[in-house]
Amino acid sequence: MKTLGDRIKYLREKKEITQKELATKTGLTVVQLSRYETNDRKPDPEALKQIADVLDTNGDYLLGRTNDSSPKITANKEDDEIEELLDDPVHGAFFKGYLDAPEQKKAEMRQFLKFILEQEKDRKPGQQQGE
């Protein structure tokens, strides 16, 4: 399993950014960044946020909580729940191809699911759709 430092270094190299460039863009020193990449030190939350922003990723990826390195900014708890539901291989099958879809298509699918859930939230058991 990749460590925090491995993930920082991997994304930095993937984006063809030097340690010095990343340090400058994040407001860190090269020494700090080097220690993060070698796992000698752990970044504080603000440094982690800066690194994630510059590397165009998310904190959960850097921390090893997910293997999805795409930046995820969700507006609220409901959005988080929808995202979690759709990321599950079983539930994500509801939308054919969701897990492999481009981000724009995923956003459209999430919006559609939010619409459906909003329409259904006040429906009582046994009540037909649209009543």
Image (tube, rainbow, N blue to C red):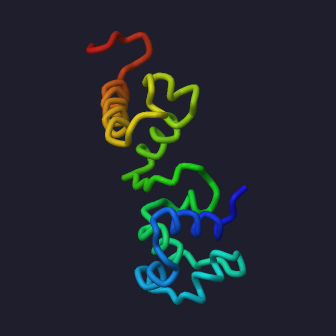
Vertical relation: 84 (above or below) 119? below
Q: Residue at x 62, y 62 (%)?
A: 63
Quadrant where the C terminus is found in the figure:
top left
Give x and y (percent) for residue 43: 60, 78
Vertical relation: 124 (above or below) 12? above
Q: Nearer the viewer, residue 19 or 87?
A: 19
Q: Nearer the viewer, residue 2 or 16?
A: 16
**Residue 118, quarter of the rendered image:** top left
Q: Nearer the viewer, residue 106 or 74?
A: 106
Give x and y (percent) for residue 35: 65, 82
Q: Residue at x 35, y 32 (%)?
A: 109
Vertical relation: 6 (above or below) 91? below
Whether residue 98 sits left or right of residue 1 in the image: it is left
Give x and y (percent) for residue 102: 38, 39
- Total tally of numbered discs in the picture: 0
Quadrant where the N terminus is found in the figure:
bottom right
Whether residue 118 sits left or right of residue 37 in the image: it is left
Vertical relation: 102 (above or below) 97? below
Give x and y (percent) for residue 11: 52, 63
**Residue 41, quarter of the rendered image:** bottom right
